[in-house]
Amino acid sequence: MIVLVQAGPTGIEYCLVKDNKRTVRRTGLDLDLLKEKIQQDAQGVEIAVFGYRVENGGDRILRSVMDVAPSLIANLGEEFQIDMDSDHVMKDCINFCRRHFVVSRHVLLCESAFLRALPEHARRFAIRDEKDDQTIRRCGRHGLAHEWALDQCRGDQKVLGPRTITLFLGDRSNLIALQDGAPQASSDGFSEIDGVVSSYGAGLIDTSIVFQLLSSGKSCEEVKEILSTQSGLLALAGTPCHLEDILTRKDAKAGFAREILTYQILKYIGSCAAVLGGVDTILFVGEPGAGMKDLIEDLLAGMSFLGVQPSSGSRRSKGITQLTGKDSGITAYYLPYDRWQVMEDLLERGDTHAAGEAAASSAISTRADRE
Amino acid sequence: MHILVFNGGSSSLSYKIFNFESPEKITLILKGKAYRVGVKGTQASYIENCYQGRTDKEVVPIPDHKTAAVLASQYIVTHKIPVDAVGHRFVHGGEYFSRSAILDDASLKKVEACLPLAPLHNPISFHVIQEAKKVFSDIPHYLVIDSAFHATIPAKAYTYPLPEEIVERYKYRRFGFHGISYSYISHKMPQILQKPAGKINMIVCHLGTGGASVMAVKDGKSVDTSMGASPNSGLIMSTRSGDIDPMAILYMIEEGGHTPAEVENILNNKSGLRGISGFSSDISDIVDNRADPALGVQANLAFDMYIQRLRGYIGSFVMTLEGKMDALVFTDDIGVNNPVVREKVCASLAWAGIVIDKDKNQRAPKDAQAFIQASSSKVAIISMPTEEELMICIEGGRMLGGRYDRVSAGRPDRDRVLSGQR
């Protein structure tokens, strides 16, 4: 039996997996209540593994899947970011569960770790590091989904070409360009705001906008609020919305929001192709929902000049759908995204880094030396 | 018709007088430039004029662009060079100007309203306009605006997904710049490509030693560009960061202890190639030091970042044009003077039909247009110098009908100019 945990600012969600069956529950921030519910659901069966989803591991959590060590989570939730509260909540949750479920293994599933492997010239922004502070770097999001998608396609299936783009489609979409499985570029930035327009986030905008908002009297907090909770698809469509809403609504505003989203994603695909020197494979990862198929078709149509030949879609193993014919210039696949399945699959992959503590210690001493 | 063109840079003022007979027949009469305008340091400011085969250099304090404009006007009046119209480059016209405009009282008010839109550029032009209008008071003055060329960008490309009330209040949108340069390139392309202007698709890279940007042209019109609401967005530039996560700015304020003004100064003047390399803002220096034992690591990082960002934008605009391109053009100082940059950028673009000929690229002249693509390339690759002052002249000639009645026009205020009054 495994328990997968993810946190938000208002509560904790967990998924208990037993005998291929899942039980998903949501609690508030009361950890004693969380413990009680988990024990109730476990019905006396020992929990082998707890897997905790962490957003931003900074420069301590270096792999997507790592055994929990105190040093890895010491500063969790304290990195400068928009949504600190989820990792801050998760840190308390991890410490609590380690105390109360002592015989279980406790494993971190880190969203940002996959993009730690970006080369320096792709991680950096074109500013100097002040006092050797290397905080401002591309951090990446949804790393678990991207890494999982690659895992699903590797091995026997041999579907991956050397130049691959993984494209996560959701309320916050992002792209990663990979050469032989190693990240080379990402649409993501330092925060959750940068990159492709999202449900509430502005995406990539001109720096002068920030300075003008500040000079108009707005505080940093107010500017953060505007750019991360009042912008994006919400601002374009006029009402709070998820990706699925934009894809299914028929009104003009939703249509315009969809046009901008599609255009931005296609441009990022071109940007990734330029970095890689071409594209062999595109992996679309997204929740199977209304409108997703149409969005992917639109994106494939935007790549038709690259020789992309859509097909009716043939099912392969592990739920992967091949979207292009055998003569297509680029091979495209769709992988349905289920966050709990992603976490479970990565845990079972067993890439837990036994030397994670040593690596983490090394990373920490290197950082201490720099300071 | 003699057209005087002013083009203000951050620490210089270029000016030329052309004899405009038609857009195809223009001759240069005078070329002048004021150097180190407002620059403090051990080297002196000076102004240089090339006229009738002579070059006159005057070392003189030039504390600001107003002084530079006065000095330029003095030379012109002293040498009795007739001027029939004055054209001014203006970087950011915001929503006030979507095309070139004659400078009358109404448009001057709009110019003043535009000053905050590009605080590093627009005030310079405004000061030059003020001084030039005092001296050349009875002839037409006109504006040619960098941002105006991109007025054709569609909404999906110019819209920032921000709250409606904020967009309305501040008029945020992608404006784009270097429009005069792009206008010149577009003006020359039909002849170069032997194709009607309205059918040309191309990507143009204006790579200057100050600012740099990329533009996508479809059917002869700008449809997207890398610069946005301000000139500090898009590509990595000499001292400008280009694209950066907006939260990085807030981090620098909240965690780094900087004021917003300090961060803005850092992003505009201490970032880019200078910020990454730590030793130079000049791409040639960066390239030359890539093998240096002491500077090589930072030089290579700066170079790789510069190339990756530029490649990324070209790749994105290939998608904008759906792969239908006639040409990839490199222009301005870095674009024509650095074959290494062109070669590295094009090395990863074969998927878009762009294949460079390394030998032609190396041999491309710096002062003339050249085709540098391989025979297998589906897209022409062109290195060509830009001529912003010439384009301003052409635009003025078109607006003013190409003729001016010099006899009935007033004379410049010679007495004011020669007495040094401002």
Image (cartoon, helix red, strand yellow):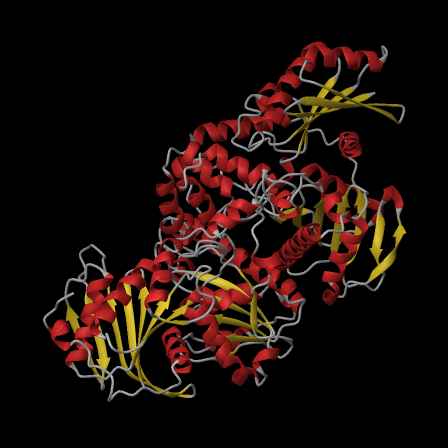
Count up the numbered dots.
Answer: 0
Up-down: is A66 above or below A298? above
Residue A126, can we see it?
Answer: no
B114 sits left or right of A176 in the view: left
A176 sits left or right of B183 in the view: right
Up-down: is B18 above or below A248? below
Farthest front residue? B106
Residue A212 picture quarter: top left
Q: Which residue: 69% across, 14% down?
A: A97
Up-down: is B267 above or below B135? above
Can you give x and y, in whole percent of width and height, for residue B281 in the image? 37, 56
Can you give x and y, in whole percent of width and height, for residue B374 in the image? 60, 77
Q: Which residue: 52% across, 57% down?
A: B174
Can you give x and y, in whole percent of width and height, for residue B352 in the image? 65, 67
A37 sits left or right of B36 in the view: right
Residue A34, can we see it?
Answer: yes
Residue B140 picture quarter: bottom left
**Quadrant location, the N terminus of chain A:** top right
Q: Which residue: 23% across, 86% down?
A: B53
- Pick whichever, A125 or A194, lies toward us: A194
**Quadrant location, the C terminus of chain A:** top left
- Pick whichever, B345 or B259, lies toward us: B259
Can you give x and y, in whole percent of width and height, for residue A275 in the image? 61, 56
